[in-house]
Amino acid sequence: MPHSSRSVLTVNLGRAMATDYTDCPDGTGIDKRPVDGPVRVSAPGPKGVGRSGLAGDMVCETRYHGGDDQAVYVYAREDLDIWERELARELANGVFGENLTTTGIDVNGARIGERWRIGRELLLEVTSPRIPCRTFAGWLNEKGWAKRFTAAAVPGAYLRVLEPGEVRAGDPVEIVHRPDHEVTVSFLFRAETTERALLPRVLAAGDALHPEARAAALKYEARAAATATEASHGR
């Protein structure tokens, strides 16, 4: 794939809106829409306190969204196009709540710890997949959406901000570092959802791994070890 084909199609921001499919008193910022001009991107602070990494973008439910390790959410236009055909409806850039809609990038094939230079200043690092929630299901209003989205295993990626900067539509995206391990966004998503036995293998991603994913993998390992010990003592 030519380097010049990797780029940001749109930068999408959302404002808080009240709905009947979220318990958050502030509503949801999932309705993200393309904006003109540059948008400043920086580390927003720890999860639970920090919100979106994009200036002017609203993240309401900080228990599950936002924070340094989920500062920017990216989804590929190519995957939106597949969903358009699957759902038989138009899906505009930003409709999945993504901050950046990209083209020419295999977002779900990106490895945890992969680093992207966007434009001249901004440097991002891939941390984790997006896990579907009740708000996402309510927003899309498709029957069995969470199960369908999970089964497809094309969740899009969260990234942390390593070097702040501005982003705008049309900015080129350069992959400046690709780690030497098997843990892609899709792999980690399957490990966290439908194929839990993969969890110990995600630890190969090292320090780049989202802290919550690391904790889940270590807990799974500990349980497996305890089960094996009990089984050996029972023989």
Image (cartoon, rainbow, N blue to C red):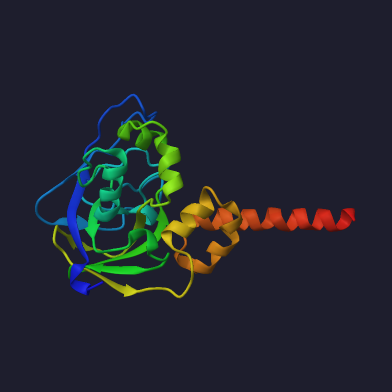
Q: 170 or 80: nearer the eye?
A: 80
Q: 174 or 146: nearer the eye?
A: 146
Q: 197 or 15: nearer the eye?
A: 197
Q: Position of residue 40 (x, y in %)?
A: 19, 57
Residue at horizontal 42%, vertical 59%?
185
Q: Quadrant of residue 102?
A: bottom left
Q: Residue furthest left?
A: 37
Q: Position of residue 43 (x, y in %)?
A: 31, 57
Q: Position of residue 202 (x, y in %)?
A: 53, 62
Q: Is residue 203 above or below residue 196?
A: below
Residue at horizontal 39%, vertical 36%?
145
Q: Residue furthest top?
A: 20
Residue at horizontal 32%, vertical 31%?
141
Residue at horizontal 43%, vertical 51%?
153
All told, the count of numbered labels is 0
Q: Quadrant of residue 158?
A: bottom left
The N terminus: image quadrant = bottom left
**From this viewpoint, is residue 235 visible?**
yes
**From this viewpoint, is residue 210 visible?**
no
Q: 6 or 113: nearer the eye?
A: 6
